[in-house]
Image: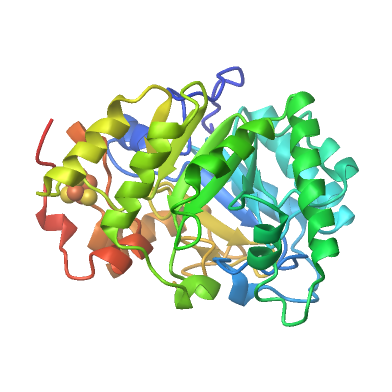
Amino acid sequence: MNVFRSSPIKELSPSYDPWDPITSLREQGRHVLTSVEMTVTNLCNMRCEHCAVGDALTAKEGEMLPLKQMLDRLEEVEHLQTISITGGEPMFRAETVKNMIVPLLKYAKERGVKSQINSNLTMPYSRYELLLPYLDVMHISFNYVNGDDFHEVGFANSGHPVSKPAAYRLYDTMIENSRRLSSDGMFISAETMINYRTHTKLPEIHQLIRNMGAKRHEVHPMYATSFASALPVLSLSEMAAAIHNLLDNRDPEMWMLFGTLPFFACSSLEEDQSLLRRLRTEQNVTLRNDPDGRNRVNVNLFTGDVFVTDFADIAAFGNIASRKLDDIFVEWQTKHPLNQKVNCHCDAASCCGPNLLVADMYYPNVDFKARKAITL
Ligand code: SF4
């Protein structure tokens, strides 16, 4: 098969974000699979309060599928542009790094596909160093203003006490790894979720992220799923106020990427329109449409099951043992009732609909398919 091979030299920037499904939607006239996320472990040294895959974390796990099986399935994806590696903590076991992660990243590099890994960055530097020649984006979560926050948030679901000194050691390791990897040329993208803890502290968190050498600050609302489903949900006005405050106090030279926001161009509220106008016009600020189910699927590398997201709420709808990823994706796109709920598209607003979890959280009774972008 003549698979799509993208240019290996195009650099990620506010004007080039291949994870955003709007680009391939425009190019192809329909959503196509351009992004494959792989879950390479369910182990993690932390148990964050908000963990979106917390219910899937385990203390032990079995054998992974053969690397070749996954590489063969990736090779069949005609329009592949990005891969993401996630967990658990993907770097938790050195063998996973060596035997699975590095070969997947090498494959991506050779094919001209951009790559991302999601890590808490608390593992030994020597493991991260192995990724330097291949990885495009090291994605970390950063929701803290100090080690106390990290201790409180990062081990909330441990089920046993974790001492402050032990948490502080990990916090310091994360910051040191970020600084060192950044100075060695790695692109660190730190994500902060807007939730009941962080919404008043975003400028301070932003400053720390900058000091850690990160190139990009990502901001998303917290998803009320898995461990986070029992946490308080912010109102839309609290969330908008938090975003304005962050924009007022950020470093305008740093790329800020906002994703899965619950504000849409079809809103009749002037405050929503004004926030969107601001986000569209601020320097170095981008709004990313949600990749989940639009241009991306997630593959569990222990079972081969394919999901729309790495969140466990929507059941698997295929398995790589028997089917091609492109075929599974087409079936999701055309037949799955959940996709039919949110697969709207207003091109003038560069919007291709809400994230399913965000829509459920804030707009349970809204039919987005019946709406259209209002301004522009
Ligand atoms: S694509 Fe959907 S969510 Fe976005 S502006 Fe249009 S109707 Fe609203």
Q: Can residue 372 be seen in this view?
A: yes
**Residue 239, percent across and down?**
34, 53
Residue 233, given in percent of the width and then of the height, sits at 38, 68
Residue 224 or residue 10, whichever sits in front: 224
Residue drawn at (37%, 60%), measured in percent from left and top? 331
Judge by depth and name the residue closer to the eye, 134 or 273: 273
Quadrant containing the C terminus is top left
Pick the residue in front: 348 or 144: 144
Residue drawn at x 43%, y 48% as measured from the top left? 291
| Quarter holding residue 365 | bottom left
Left or right: residue 147 versus residue 307 is right
- State whether residue 331 is above or below residue 113: below
Location of residue 177 by image quarter: top right
Tell me where residue 261 appears, x and y as whole percent. Answer: 34, 49
Identify the colour scheme used.
rainbow
Q: In which quarter of the image is the N terminus?
A: top right
Q: Can residue 1 be seen in this view?
A: no
Extreme-bottom residue of the structure: 159
Going by the image, does 67 lie left or right of 268? Answer: right
Q: Where is residue 193 in the image (x, y as percent from the top left)?
A: 49, 53
Specify the quadrant of the image occupied by residue 46. bottom right
Q: How many marks?
A: 0
Residue 146 as seen in the image, left or right of residue 265: right
Q: Residue at x 47, y 33 (%)?
A: 256
Name the residue: 82% across, 70% down. Answer: 163
